[in-house]
Image (tube, helix red, strand yellow):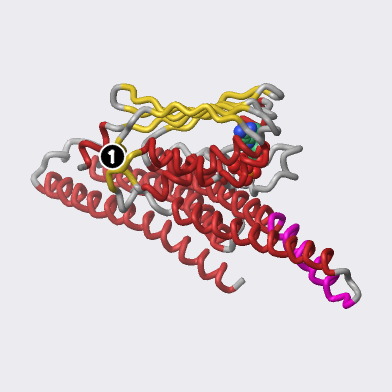
Amino acid sequence: MKKERRRNLRNTALWLHFTITIFDIFLIVSILLFVLALAADRLGFFRQHSPSPLFLILMMLIISVISATSISALIAKRVLMSISEMSRAAQEVAKGNFDVKLSESNHILEIYELQHNFNIMTSELRGIETLRNDFIVNVSHEFKTPLAAIDGYATLIQDPDMPEDERLEYIGMIIESARQLSRLTGNILKLSKLENQELVYDKKEYSLDEQIRQAVLWLEREWSPKDINFEINLEECKYYGNSDLMMQIWINLIGNAVKFTDNGGNISISLVRCDDKVIFTITDNGIGMDEKTKEHIFEKFYQADGTRGRAGNGLGLALVKRITDMCKGEVSVESSPGVGSQFKVVLPLNEQKRER
Ligand code: ADP
């Protein structure tokens, strides 16, 4: 309360200061004009007029000083009211309340711009706050299931009479849940690191087609029990980039194609060089996606309804998108429910020649 009063006093002082300055300027100019008029009178310029022009000049000067000072006081008060409103709003923002909005009604361009930019700032902050809250909710949600599983199975295996095969099965479940948690934290860390990084480091030239073949082999444990048919056509292509990051793209896209394709399904992978770009395409005849899912799949933690049961945490495609963006490339998807999906990654090659 005290602070508020002090601030108001300071505000008043500011607008008074502005008014007094205007008043001073007018007063000095008026005195000068009056001294000039006085000198002219002494020299006999006004002698034949009545009432004395000197008196008229004095009256005019007094009226102009009063009116100009009052007008400037009104204007100054109006301007400073907006500033004090902004100061109060900024205090609210500092306290963490991003819902404040200033009225963008000031006619002075600079003040109007200040109010407008302030509102943009609070709206951006509101967006970040929502993202942060969503992030916390999503992370907690993703942690909850494996933690509950570990808790449940660990409690069960404490029973000394439990048959050995059942105990082993539950231990397996605990290990799988722990790995799920480890994958989740690993992906969160990777994504947050990449989101704070603009440039790709540790680049080297390597064979992209060879790397994609390695990625398919790396996932053998996933696709061989499902009896999936692969059709692979990879043109030879040297790529200059960070091979670990690029491997993430291929593992996530091929892993998803395997995960969302039923037993005995088909997956085709191609790599084509085209002018100054290289195009990677992966097509599956799996479950496919509806329009709503396609719109959101690159968002963090997004998983389509009905796919949540399958291992995953909705971070894979967010990572793919972030890495392709960092490489100045593009990733796109075409898909129909029940028909299958096609992901395309386009990476520029020219950019890299210049960098080297
Ligand atoms: P997840 O770890 O769940 O696979 P992703 O970010 O990789 O996370 O994918 C997000 C969601 O996109 C998946 O949960 C799934 O609903 C959908 N999706 C991704 N790839 C495919 C695909 N090839 N076929 C069908 N749906 C897919």
Check disc 1: other Cα within 10 Å, few if <14, some if 14-19, many if 20+.
few
Residue 257 placement (x, y as % from top left): 60, 35
Q: Is residue 37 left or right of residue 252?
A: left
- Between residues 255 and 148, which one lies in front from this camera angle? 255
Observer able to see residue 296: no
Observer able to see residue 90: yes
Ligand 1 placement by image quarter: top right
- Quadrant where the C terminus sits is top left
Q: Which residue is mark 1?
A: 51
For the stretch drawn in magenta, what is the main secondary structure? helix
Relative to 275, does residue 163 appear above or below in the rendering? below
Asked whether 67 falls inside the magenta stretch, the response is: no
Magenta residues (range):
141-160
Asked whether 146 falls inside the magenta stretch, the response is: yes
At horizontal 88% and vertical 75% (from top left) the residue drawn is 159
Residue 204 placement (x, y as % from top left): 28, 47
At horizontal 62% and vertical 71% (from top left) the residue drawn is 1
At horizontal 71% and vertical 44% (from top left) the residue drawn is 310
What is the three-letter code of the residue carrying label 1?
Pro
